[in-house]
Image (cartoon, rainbow, N blue to C red):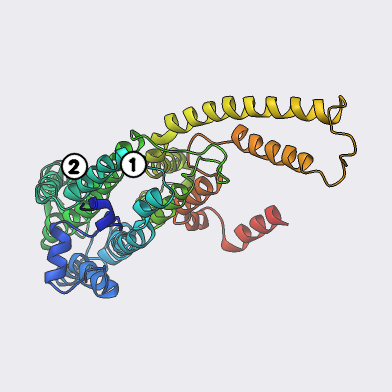
Amino acid sequence: MNKPECFKNPDFSLVLGGPLFQLLRRAHLTGDALELLRRRIVVISMLVWLPLLVLSALEGTALGGGTAIPFLFDVEVHIKFLGIIPLFIVAELVVHKRMRFVVKQFLERNLIAENDLPKFDAAIASAFRLRNSVLAEVLLIAFVYVVGVLIIWRHYTALAIPTTTWYATVSGGVSKLSLSGVWYGYVSVPLFQFLIMRWYFRFFIWTRFLAQVSRLDLSLVPTHPDHVGGLGFLSNTVFAFTPLVVAHGALLAGFIANRIFYVGASLPQFKIEIAVLVVFLLCLVLGPLLLFTPKLAEAKRTGNREYGTLAERYVREFDSKWLRGGAPPGEPLVGSGDIQSLADLNNSFEIVRTMGIAPITRDAVIRLAAAALIPIVPLALTMMPLEELLKKLLGILF
């Protein structure tokens, strides 16, 4: 009898597939397991950033040239292409290494009922088909150019600026892209948007996979020490997305920095945007795990009922034996295993009572929120000198 596909391919990867991955392999920018990380970062980052430097220098807008924002002083652009894109690339390796054993955990912990193994196998195969889909990435490219570039970027971002910048000039109230602006708008920005949209598509694949698994007949154990029926390993998968969370924080930090330096804005003006970003990222990363809440809640209710019945029976028999004279004559109380069994039963019942209904830990929430805020923290220096900021921090800590 042939083994299911899940036993043939126990490593689950959201990133080892798709047309872009195959293109990078043929270009010798990656190996079968995402090797050549530095080469990939340098080539892709320089593809989107270096031509902008050269063209803006030739046009005289790299350092000034009568522009409101010279290229070398455009913080948002440098953060995007020299900071965030490398983080997107690093995230692929991190996600691959930290999430490749997820499928094994479901199987090794016997969480999938034997009659549902074919469905589990089908969920994996479906995730791999989406990950490898040529059509999906073609549609992402089309969306980036039609919506991201031709509509949003041209009409609401780039040419909506009323002053001359390194990538666009304003004459008679009409904005026109420079040569560097053409490369920026039709190569650099689309590639950046494609990479981020590709990650959102991977989140969709991950969410869809977990949704399919959550509908299976899961063998959850209410007394499991991880307090989530044996699904505690899923809470660790969220840390694989930390580089992506930092990248989103850096994206907002670059946007805010340009507004502070060139428009006269202040950091407190963006508190709503910062809060929305943190909530969005927590929902993006932790939200898929909530799909297991119905099954965990059901397991907790069942565990409370069953272990409550067992505890009732045991404590009544213990009471009858040791407090109502039911113990055999001469049986010593000291050394009896009954008391230890009562304590063990109490511990088991306490685990069931405190069982969580989502494989999400407080530590995960705090660390993800901190990762999103770390790139924004340095902007606090625009509000007060570094020395004063350090004094306030030391005052809070000590």
The residue positioned 42% from the left and 50% from the top of the image is: 238
The residue positioned 48% from the left and 42% from the top of the image is: 359
Judging by the rendered image, the residue that carries numbered circle 1 is 114
Horizontally, residue 369 falls left or right of residue 331, namely left
Mark in front: 2 vs 1: 1
Q: Quadrant of the C terminus?
A: bottom right
> What's the distance in space between the residues labelled 2 and 1, CA to CA?
50 Å
Q: Nearer the viewer, residue 167 or 120?
A: 120
234 shown above or below 45:
above
Mark 1 Cα shell of 10 Å, populated few (<14), some (14-19), many (≥20): few
Question: Where is residue 159 shown, x and y percent of the image?
Answer: 17, 47
Q: Nearer the viewer, residue 289 or 377?
A: 289
Question: Where is residue 350 shown, x and y percent of the image?
Answer: 66, 36
The residue positioned 33% from the left and 35% from the top of the image is: 216
Question: Where is residue 20 shown, x and y percent of the image?
Answer: 15, 60
Which numbered disc flags the more N-terminal residue, 2 or 1?
1
Horizontally, residue 198 falls left or right of residue 242, namely left
Identify which amino acid the numbered label 1 is placed on. Glu
Task: Provide the secondary structure element on which disc 2 rests.
Answer: helix
Horizontally, residue 381 falls left or right of residue 340, namely left
Total tally of numbered discs in the picture: 2
Mark 2 Cα shell of 10 Å, populated few (<14), some (14-19), many (≥20): some
Asked if the residue under mark 1 is in contact with the one under mark 2, i.e. CB atoms within 8 Å, the reply is no
92 shown above or below 322:
below
Identify which amino acid the numbered label 2 is placed on. Ile
Horizontally, residue 158 falls left or right of residue 396, namely left
Task: Inspect this view and state whether residue 103 appears.
Answer: yes
Q: Residue 152 got which mark?
A: 2
